[in-house]
């Protein structure tokens, strides 16, 4: 019982500790401007983490998200001058296609998700490197920039997109049959198969969903940096998985929620933001983030269900 | 070496797995331990082998007290165990499998393995027990019986004086069984003390000198096999009082008038996997068809084939007249066949989820893509009332329910889709008497409403009390069909199973 309580309150406790520590070190931490910046910094992470929530709830994983974000940003950059705002369409489609490949490998090829997405991570990044030859592709279309990195009424468009998507994801998980099926697969895959849930179809769909969301994330990131660089999105998978897990969704699957993920994204972003503000050495920041991830997994994982992550 | 056990007892929580068991394994004799499923045979053998410790009771080896705290200690004292499951590692060679517990004995400095020596020693062990396998054979080519012989060789390699085998012939066919029994005879002639657990009475009579019968965990008696007939053994294994009123009465049959309800499921020459070799049967509306059979006889494979969980090797099925060839369990559910698996924790329910979640899992009420939570709640509350599930409410976690109530939830999941046919696999396994009565009443009522039911069970009284017809499977085919259960006694059924 106590373990359960710890597992559920861990994200809140951690958030409180974070805020206390960093506001102690810097008076600017809790300012309105900084908090707005935090929201903007966290949007790309949030959009990707929304998709990752489904995957982890189903007991699988996807470490190719950073590369999908990179490919999507590239597609957006390349099509921006001809399609302007509508560059979002090819970005999402390419992202979804990458997700489809991941899903097929896992659900039909039965390649364990960790290995499959480790492979596609390298392949998708390879496409980006091949195309860009290492040189960034600038985005110059005004319409594009205004839509995806502009502001209305003081709030960034990107943040609005992120929150809207969070709402959509929340509805899907809590109010649709698909959401229940994702949860059931994570709770017991063998039971789900025997009870007639279309496990293969659900798995493919959730990877396509993640891919599409990464498409949007890539687009937003490209808009922020006004270019698609060869390494855009590199290492994002660490942050995304950390956000989902730190927010309280165990890697073993079955439990979790969008609110948890949003909390996790907030924590990870605040952590980075706070460390920057207090001048923590950038290399040390990576170490700290890694330790936070290990700690979070250690606390939240359901030890009765440990097996190889499918 | 003589192994004497006296008044062994073992409890697991509420369950008394073995009660007051005493037996003597004599030198150079084969001693069989028989009984139905759940009788306590494996428990007893594992206590002798050191795998588990008895709660009380004493054992001696040649007069010296014997209380091993582990299999390793037992082996050191000269008692070796061959497990029920196959414990062969198919990646390693035969020699490596035989010496798996003692690879260090065949290594030089720095851990390099003395391959030739190990191979020669392995071949010597195999030859000594009359097994005609060459150690150079690729292990993938061995059949189950030969693998069992390799496991016996492994047990022998520690030079024991007592060998214990736990249901080693469960999944073997005739020839493989003969091969294993030959090995046992050879060992016996070399003075080995042998104890083995088996379901198959004919094997027991063929190979054993002494016999201990267990029933429901209770020691019934020890006998010399030469003095027993199969019928006597069966009676002692299963004879028990029928508790009146546990099983609801069957609907009366008109005499002379052949009842002809329409056939729900027709199965022709079905073969599934390795176990089911060719079975034909029919289930009608309102009928409860019982399936009896030992482990490995094909009952599980039959249900898996009908449910769509395993592909058919051959044969065909028809559901309400249409061809039925399910590609996966989903197809089964969609066409109105509900499946209740035997392992409720791992295959039937998701224990962390609520009662509601589990009840509606097979067909969640929906409006388009959206889950209709209100309707789901109504449906689950209705099911809870109808079935009598004792839980705090639809949102109670299944893990917190008793075994009987979890089983009721499982049954509810099956009934929730309004099925034409339900496949029940041991529906009252691990369920208390009160819940059992409820479940039986519900099953009989649903049958009266027109539902077809296939009931596969290891619980003999349950099969006899509930089934309208009974099919007995043995080694993958139908051994006998009881078209009426009137006056049928347990030992008659068991006779065909073994």
Image (spheres, coloured by chain):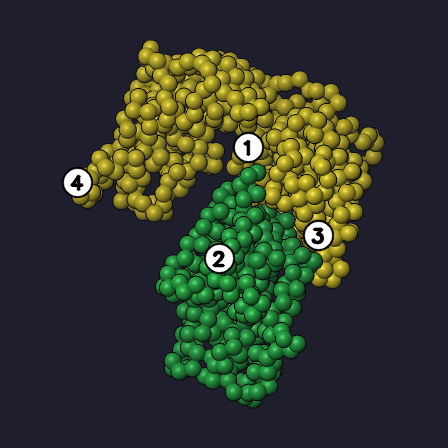
**Label 2–label 1 contact, CB within 8 A:** no
Which chain is home to disc 2?
A
Mark number, residue B294: 1
Assign a secondary structure to mark 1.
loop
Circle 4 crowding by C-alpha within 10 Å: few under 14, some 14–19, many from 20: few
As measured in the structure, the alpha-carbon distance from the residue carrying label 3 to the one carrying label 1 is 33 Å
Along the line of sight, the residue nearer the viewer: B290 or B350: B350
Along the line of sight, the residue nearer the viewer: A126 or B141: A126
Count of all numbered marks drawn on residues in the image: 4
Whether residue B228 is visible, yes or no, is: no
Which of discs 4 and 1 lies nearer the camera? The answer is: 4
Which chain is home to disc 3?
B
Residue that mark 3 sits on:
B363
Q: Both on one chain, marks 2 and 1? A: no
Q: Both on one chain, marks 3 and 2? A: no
Q: Which residue is drawn at 61% across and 38% down?
A: B399
In this view, the residue farthest toward the left is B109
Q: Residue at x 49, y 47 (%)?
A: A299
Q: Which residue is drawn at 78% across and 27% down?
A: B249
């Amino acid at each position: 019982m106590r373990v359960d309580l710890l597992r559920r309150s861990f994200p809140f406790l951690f958030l409180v500790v974070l805020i206390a520590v960093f506001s102690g070190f810097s008076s600017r931490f809790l300012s309105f401007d900084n908090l707005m910046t935090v929201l903007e910094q966290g949007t790309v992470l949030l959009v990707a983490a929304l998709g990752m929530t489904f995957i982890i709830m189903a007991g699988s994983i996807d470490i190719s998200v950073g590369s999908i974000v990179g490919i999507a940003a590239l597609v957006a950059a390349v099509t921006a001058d001809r399609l302007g705002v509508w560059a979002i369409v090819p970005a999402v489609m390419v992202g979804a296609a990458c997700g489809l490949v991941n899903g097929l490998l896992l659900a039909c090829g039965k390649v364990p998700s960790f290995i499959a997405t480790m492979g596609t991570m390298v392949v998708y990044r390879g496409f980006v490197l091949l195309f860009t030859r290492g040189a960034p592709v600038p985005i110059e279309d005004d319409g594009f920039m205004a839509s995806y990195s502009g502001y209305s009424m003081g709030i960034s468009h990107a943040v609005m997109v992120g929150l809207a998507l969070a709402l959509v994801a929340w509805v899907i998980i809590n109010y649709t049959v698909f959401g229940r099926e994702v949860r059931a697969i994570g709770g017991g895959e063998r039971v789900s198969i025997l009870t007639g849930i279309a496990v293969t179809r659900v798995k493919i769909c959730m990877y396509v969903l993640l891919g599409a969301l990464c498409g949007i994330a890539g687009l937003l990131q490209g808009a922020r940096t006004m270019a698609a660089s060869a390494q855009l999105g590199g290492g994002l998978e660490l942050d995304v998985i950390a956000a989902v897990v730190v927010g309280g969704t165990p890697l073993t699957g079955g439990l979790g929620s969008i609110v948890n993920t949003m909390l996790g994204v907030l924590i990870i972003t605040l952590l980075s933001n706070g460390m920057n503000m207090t001048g923590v050495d950038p290399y040390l920041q990576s170490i700290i983030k890694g330790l936070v991830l290990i700690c979070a997994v250690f606390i939240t994982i359901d030890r009765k269900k440990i097996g190889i992550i499918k | 070496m003589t192994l004497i056990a006296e008044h062994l007892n073992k409890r697991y929580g509420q369950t008394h797995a073995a009660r007051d068991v005493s037996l003597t394994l004599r030198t150079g004799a084969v001693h069989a331990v028989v009984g139905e499923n759940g009788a306590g045979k494996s428990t007893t053998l594992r206590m002798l082998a050191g795998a588990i410790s008895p709660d009380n009771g004493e054992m001696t080896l040649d007069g010296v007290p014997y209380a091993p705290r582990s299999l390793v200690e037992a082996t050191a004292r000269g008692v070796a165990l061959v497990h029920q499951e196959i414990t062969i590692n198919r990646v390693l060679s035969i020699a490596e499998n035989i010496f798996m517990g003692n690879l260090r004995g065949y290594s030089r400095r720095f851990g390099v393995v003395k391959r030739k020596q190990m191979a020669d020693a392995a071949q010597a062990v195999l030859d000594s027990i009359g097994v005609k396998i060459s150690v150079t054979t690729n292990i993938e080519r061995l059949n189950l019986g030969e693998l069992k012989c390799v496991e016996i060789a492994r047990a022998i390699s520690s030079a024991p004086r007592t060998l214990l085998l736990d249901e080693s012939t469960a999944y073997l066919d005739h020839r493989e069984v003969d091969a294993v029994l030959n090995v046992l005879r050879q060992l016996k002639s070399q003075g080995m003390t042998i104890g083995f657990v088996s379901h198959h009475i004919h094997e027991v009579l063929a190979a054993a000198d002494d016999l201990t019968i267990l029933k429901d965990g209770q020691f019934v008696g020890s006998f010399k096999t030469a003095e027993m007939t199969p019928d006597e053994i069966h009676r002692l294994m299963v004879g028990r009082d029928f508790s009146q009123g546990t099983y609801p009465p069957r609907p009366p049959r008109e005499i002379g008038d052949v009842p002809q309800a329409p056939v729900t499921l027709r199965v022709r020459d079905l073969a599934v996997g390795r176990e089911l070799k060719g079975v034909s049967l029919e289930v009608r509306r309102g009928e409860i068809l019982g399936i009896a059979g030992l482990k490995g006889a094909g009952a599980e494979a039959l249900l898996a084939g009908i449910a769509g969980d395993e592909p058919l090797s051959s044969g065909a099925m028809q559901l309400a007249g249409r061809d039925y060839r399910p590609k996966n369990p989903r197809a089964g559910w969609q066409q109105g066949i509900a499946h209740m698996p035997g392992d409720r924790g791992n295959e039937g329910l998701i224990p962390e989820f609520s009662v509601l979640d589990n009840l509606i899992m097979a067909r969640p009420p929906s409006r388009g893509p959206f889950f209709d939570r209100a309707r789901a709640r109504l449906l689950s509350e209705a099911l809870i009332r109808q079935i009598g599930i004792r839980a705090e409410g639809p949102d109670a976690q299944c893990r917190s329910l008793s075994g009987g109530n979890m089983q009721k939830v499982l049954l509810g999941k099956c009934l929730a889709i309004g099925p034409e046919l339900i496949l029940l696999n041991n529906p009252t396994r691990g369920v208390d008497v009160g819940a059992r009565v409820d479940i039986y009443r519900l099953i009989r009522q649903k049958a009266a409403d027109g539902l077809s039911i296939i009931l596969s069970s290891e619980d003999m009284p349950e099969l006899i009390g509930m089934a309208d017809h009974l099919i007995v499977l043995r080694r993958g085919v139908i051994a006998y069909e009881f078209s009426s259960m009137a006056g049928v006694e347990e030992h008659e059924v068991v006779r065909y199973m073994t």
